[in-house]
């Protein structure tokens, strides 16, 4: 008798907590992906900054200064592309998370709403 009661209670608890478990898994996955994107962006920007510092330290005369300055337009173009690309990735990640949460909410509303 008690075994059946505990089994029933356990099943009901599991069923009622299922949406929270799904949301927590979804949230954790999103934070993981966001962290990976941020780390990749920080790495790329750090590499760019370090390469600029190295290039500046190589300036010894007017010719190397001219060469450095001519390279800056290309570096700014690459930085601009990187920023746009990173912005698109973050936006896509946020949109995907929003869509998945909306699906989860719609699924739970459907289960709770009497047919």
Image: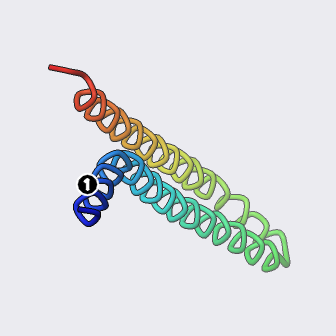
Check disc 1 and report the residue beneath it: 8
Determine whether, in the image, residue 39 is placed left or right of residue 9: right
Q: Residues within 10 Å of mark 1 (few under 14, many from 20)?
A: few
* Residue 95 in picture, x, y percent from top left: 40, 37
Residue occupying the point 36% across, 42% down: 96
Residue at the top extreme? 115
For the residue pair 67 and 97, the one nearer the viewer reads as 97
Assign the C terminus to one quadrant of the image: top left
Q: Which element type, helix, strand or loop, lies under badge 1?
A: helix
At horizontal 51% and vertical 50% (from top left) the residue drawn is 86
Q: From the viewer's side, name the closer residue of 61 and 8.
A: 8
x and y, in percent, of residue 53 in the image: 78, 73
Seen as rendered, the residue at the extreme left is: 115
Q: Is residue 16 left or right of residue 47?
A: left
Q: Is residue 84 above or below residue 103?
A: below
Q: Residue farthest to the front? A: 1
Q: Quadrant of residue 78?
A: bottom right
Q: How many numbered tags mark residues here?
A: 1
Relative depth, front residue between 94 and 63: 94
Between 70 and 88, the one nearer to me in the picture: 88
């Amino acid at each position: 008798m008690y075994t059946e009661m505990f089994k029933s209670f356990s099943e009901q608890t599991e069923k009622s907590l299922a949406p929270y478990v799904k949301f927590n898994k979804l949230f954790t996955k999103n934070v993981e992906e966001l962290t990976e994107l941020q780390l990749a962006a920080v790495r790329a920007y750090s590499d760019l900054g370090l390469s600029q510092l190295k290039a500046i330290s190589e300036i010894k005369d007017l010719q190397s200064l001219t060469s450095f300055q001519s390279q800056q337009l290309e570096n700014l173009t690459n930085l601009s592309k990187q920023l746009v690309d990173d912005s698109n990735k973050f936006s896509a990640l946020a949109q995907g998370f929003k869509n998945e949460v909306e699906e989860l909410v719609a699924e739970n509303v459907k289960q709770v709403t009497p047919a």
